[in-house]
Amino acid sequence: MACGSSSPSPRVAPFTASTKDTLYLWGGDGDKEPEAVFVYSVNTETWTKKLTEGPHPPAGLNNGGCSIAGQNLYLYGGYGGSYSGSLYQLNTDTWTWRELCNGSSDGGPQKKAGCGMVTYQDQLWVVGGYYKDDKNLKSRQPGSRYEGRHTNEVHCYSLTTGKG
């Protein structure tokens, strides 16, 4: 794997997603450039640093869910001094961020880190994770398990309607 001046700095638990031949990397504990997304080309084995615009996720956010649909990269949750319940979208054509949801409400996912996220058709699915503690749970999803700070919740966000 080639490295160079455009390669990302060392970090722990960044948000990553991939397409057929491209890896996208943002954030993580130790990230010093929250306005930048790093793109790795599998074909050329090179990193490219892309500067972004718009309200990017907070610096130092790490260990959340990340997925890609079409030209958009999606990030959910994570931890960076506090737990996040926000869903962000990055358009990889314009390199512009947009916050789609802020916090958990109406039975949506809890503010958490350590969750997985996948894209299926026009939906984002957030699975599992951990949160601050049981006392701060706004709701419990019927049929889900909660053990200590960990959960197996499954939540769906529609990219068509913008609702979760």
Image (spheres, helix red, strand yellow):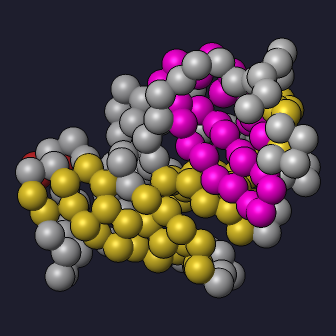
Q: Quadrant of the N terminus?
A: top right
Residue 69 figure quarter: bottom right
In which image quadrant can residue 133 be found?
Answer: top left
- For the image, the number of numbered tags is 0
Nearer-the-camera pick, 110 or 64: 64
Question: Where residue 11 appears, x then y in whole percent?
Answer: 53, 23
- Classify residue 115 by image quadrant: bottom left
Residue sticking out furthest to the front: 1
Whether residue 135 sits left or right of residue 53 in the image: it is left
Residue 153 is situated, as x and y percent measured from the top left of the image, at 28, 69
Query: Which x, y percent locates residue 123?
Result: 59, 78
74 lies left or right of 47: left
Q: x%, y% of residue 161?
A: 64, 81
Q: Is residue 38 magenta?
A: yes
Regarding residue 100, the answer to whether it shows in the image is no
Relative vertical location of residue 25 with respect to residue 162 in this rendering, above or below: above
Q: Can residue 56 be seen in this snapshot?
A: yes
Identity of the residue drawn at 79% across and 69% down:
70
The boundaries of the magenta stretch are: 14-40
Q: Residue at x 65, y 18 (%)?
A: 9
> Which residue is located at x 65 percent, y 84 percent?
121
Residue 142 left/right relative to 106: left
Asked whether 85 falls inside the magenta stretch, the response is no
Q: What residue appears at the point 83 percent right and 52 percent down from the top-left corner? A: 92
